[in-house]
Image (spheres, rainbow, N blue to C red):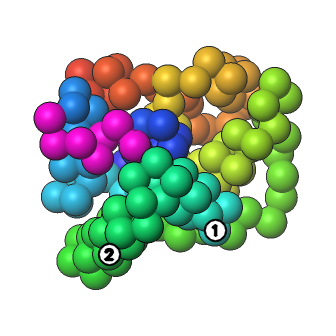
Amino acid sequence: MIVCLDTNVLLQARASGHAFFPILDSWVAGKFTLAVSTGILLEYEEVIARMSGREQWRKFARLMDYVELTTGAVLRVTPHYHFQVINHDPDDNIFTDCAITAGADYLITEDRHFAPLASAGYHPQPITPVEFISKHL
């Protein structure tokens, strides 16, 4: 299974006591593949560094490298087409473009701006972290 994680979900899942931690823990164990693009990685870096410090970003980047080397559960994609699925917050299109290009099953998010993805005719479906955990973990 391939998923794309919205930044807000990733931020919360990094905390070991958080309800979303099982998402990150399952990814590290290789139970699903995380799809990322350069745009997503840059957003992850910017937000994690701003909110938690550069060292926390470096820790997460090392974790991604570790997971990629040990389980292969990282899929790096380069979207060459901009699908423009999200009109309300166009910055969110980096996630839909990545998810569509990667052939992802889900885009895990709590953001209602991703609702148009459900009916856009593409394979990835938006799913909340709680729904993802209850259905797949």
Image coordinates of residue 51 in percent, x first then y, are: 46, 48
> Picture quarter containing residue 96?
top right
* Tag of residue 62: 2
Residue 25 visible to an observer of this rendering: yes
Answer whether residue 15 is magenta in the image: yes
Q: Is 53 drawn above or below residue 76 in the view shown? A: above
Question: Which of these two is toward me, 24 or 123?
Answer: 24
In the image, taking residue 25 as reference, residue 49 lies left or right, namely right
Which residue is drawn at the image coordinates 21% and 77% (left, top)? 70
Residue type, label 1? Thr
> Picture quarter containing residue 18?
top left
Q: Is 44 drawn above or below residue 105 in the view shown? A: below
Which stretch is magenta? 11-17
| The C terminus, quarter of image | top left
Kind of element beneath mark 2: helix
Circle 1 residue: 38
Image coordinates of residue 15 in percent, x first then y, are: 23, 42
Image coordinates of residue 121 in percent, x first then y, are: 73, 30
In the image, taking residue 33 as reference, residue 19 lies left or right, namely left
Viewer-nearest of discs 2 and 1? 2
* Tag of residue 3: none
Which residue is drawn at the image coordinates 68% and 23% (left, top)? 113
Image coordinates of residue 131 in percent, x first then y, are: 34, 20
Which residue is drawn at the image coordinates 85% and 29% (left, top)? 87
Question: Which of these two is toward me, 42 or 50?
Answer: 50
Q: Residues within 10 Å of mark 1 (few under 14, many from 20)?
A: some
Kind of element beneath mark 1: helix
What is the spatial separation of the Cα atoms under label 2 and label 1, in whole angstroms? 16 Å
